[in-house]
Image (spheres, grey):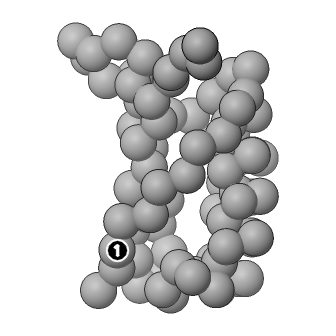
């Protein structure tokens, strides 16, 4: 069983946002069930190798991507917001 984990980052583009997100995961990984350093390194490699989130049709500023590990699927929703 997994869980739902939320993070917020400030970034200029999607790739930078994903990289910033993995830094947060590295910092908080002990709080995230089943997230080992090995899984995190594979996730970072997929992002570096060009994993591209998919813009969701009919929605504004929302993307989706997923990452596979041996035992799990990590679903990632990205929502662009504006700071006030």
**For the point 66% across and 40% down, which residue is it?**
9
Measured along the vertical axis of the image, is residue 58 above or below residue 23? Answer: above
For the question of whether residue 15 can be seen, the reply is: no
**For the point 47% across and 55% down, which residue is it?**
6
Q: Is residue 8 left or right of residue 37?
A: left
**For the point 75% across and 46% down, which residue is it?**
20
Quarter of the image containing the N terminus?
bottom left
For the question of whether residue 11 can be seen, the reply is: yes
Percent coordinates x, y for residue 25 in the rendering: 66, 65
Name which quarter of the figure residue 52 lies in: top right
Measured along the vertical axis of the image, is residue 3 above or below residue 14? Answer: below
Name which quarter of the figure residue 31 lies in: bottom right
Q: Which residue is mark 1?
A: 3
**For the point 44% across and 49% down, which residue is it?**
76
Quarter of the image containing the C terminus?
top right
> Element type at marker 1?
loop
Q: Is residue 1 left or right of residue 12?
A: left
């Amino acid at each position: 069983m997994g869980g739902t984990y939320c993070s917020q980052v400030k970034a200029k583009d999607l790739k930078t946002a994903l990289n910033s997100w993995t830094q947060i995961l590295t910092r908080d990984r002990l709080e995230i069930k089943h997230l080992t350093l090995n899984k995190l390194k594979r996730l970072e490699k997929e992002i570096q190798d060009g994993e591209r989130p998919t813009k969701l049709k009919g929605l504004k500023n929302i993307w989706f991507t997923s990452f596979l590990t041996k035992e799990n699927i990590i679903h990632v929703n990205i929502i662009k917001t504006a700071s006030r």
